[in-house]
Amino acid sequence: MAGQNLMQTVKPSPHLQGEVLLPGDKSISHRVAILDSLSQGKSTIKNFAPGRDCWHTVTCLKALGVPIQILKSQSTLSLSVSGRGRMGFREPRDVLYAGNSGTTMRLLSGLLAAQPFLSIITGDASLRGRPMSRLIEPLRLMGAEIWGREQDLLAPLVIRGRALHGAEIPLTIPSAQIKSAILLAGLFAQGNTVLYQSVKSRDHTERLLTAMGAKLDTDGNHLCLSPLTMPLSSISFRVPGDLSSAAYFLVAGAIHSNARITVRACGINPTRTGIIDALVAMGAKIQMRNERMEVGEPLADITVESSELRGIEMGGGIIPRIIDELPILAVAACVARGRTVIRGAGELRVKESDRIAAMLKELGKMGADIEELADGMIITGGKRLRGAKVDSHSDHRLAMSLAIAGLLATGETIINRAQVTQISYPAFWQELQRLVERA
Ligand code: S3P
């Protein structure tokens, strides 16, 4: 990420007590901004994710002619979106820029494949290194004209929008970004779009589409989307807190010997709660209260207390439900008694950084015992971590995971390129500080 380098120092704290303010859920924020733009009518989205990733989605939608107003209050962000209807977007006058955000690039590409104009979309160096053939290939099955650099492997992507047709598409990678891109394209296709997912990934797009009046049938692992005959109805709502951001504090609370931390109004969509299941299986004391629903999305207040964790083995269907939380889970595993084995998580290698290699290297500097697997890692816990100079690899989830490791380590941990938390949790360092000071 461009801008001034931030070297953040983290020291062990005798207590961790209090409530943490969460940002709005990033995955839901991207989707609701896109779908409200496509709807007919005006909507207000409260507690919109404040990080750079969702900001890129908003900027791209504005470049496509969607009037979006940003309303800032003390600690939260709201959007007012004037939906343009089914075919109301205009050709962007310049290259669209998705920054570090895979969700922006992939979801918008599905939408743009069906618009009657040319779009080019690019991103930062990390995003331009991430695989795009997984997006291009299924969209082509629907008739899309979309190309990428290096024989359709990488972004920038060039999309000549055109009329699409429905297709039967097997999702070979359990990726919600690809599934959502296909569903967005399918809204405009002639005929039904049928998707087969052998493993279920996050389903926010499906829930929102249903709430907005699209015809989407689910039968086991099949999804069948009918093209839109009427515009989507706009929805206004308050985005739940982001469980992926809460995860840093849930782990901190569980592994610290004198902690009690609460997060409120946090999303607990079952396609995202792998981190809670894994922590509970490791012995974490986690309590959920006030479970409720907000436009088809479940949320709750969650409290965690100091716990004695033990290692676990994980793989298979839980992996897509915990994929973004595996770096912080690795930190929990370093502290837990015994071995933690993570398999079937090769996708970690194509995230904002190669998260297997990066965690191995950085936690290794702190004395962690981690064995690298092609698709995961084996962590032998129970060792005291020691403070070190570590690097975020410009990956927000690494920066925050290393910060929590630093809280438990002896001495000081200095995190290089710590400004990258701006991607998903701009207030992370302040929240961490508040938690330590309140103690
Ligand atoms: C996301 C899906 C996941 C996740 C990413 C956000 C989404 O990616 O890692 O941070 O909002 O759809 P994949 O769908 O590529 O697994």
Image (cartoon, rainbow, N blue to C red):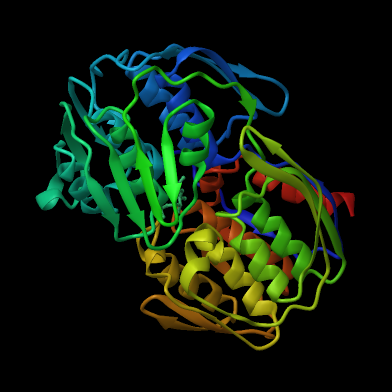
Q: Quadrant of residue 238?
A: top right
Q: Position of residue 188 (x, y in %)?
A: 27, 27
Q: Position of residue 213 (x, y in %)?
A: 48, 26
Left or right side of 127 for 167: left
Q: Position of residue 402 (x, y in %)?
A: 60, 63
**Residue depicted at x 40% and y 20%:** 38
Left or right side of 193 for 69: right
Q: Is residue 156 above or below residue 82?
A: below
**Residue depicted at x 31% and y 29%:** 227
Q: On the rendered image, what quadrant is the C terminus found in?
A: bottom right
Q: Residue 352: tell me if it is visible.
A: no
Q: Is residue 68 above or below residue 228?
A: above
Left or right side of 336 for 328: left
Q: Position of residue 157 (x, y in %)?
A: 20, 39
Q: Quadrant of residue 272?
A: bottom right
**Residue depicted at x 53% and y 34%:** 29
| Outermost residue to the left | 151
User: In the rendered picture of this protein, how many numbered marks are placed on residues?
Assistant: 0
Q: Is residue 277 above or below residue 39?
A: below
**Residue depicted at x 58% and y 33%:** 50
Taking depth in this image into account, of 3 and 252 the one nearest to the observer is 252
Taking depth in this image into account, of 99 and 286 the one nearest to the observer is 286
Q: Is residue 49 above or below residue 340?
A: above
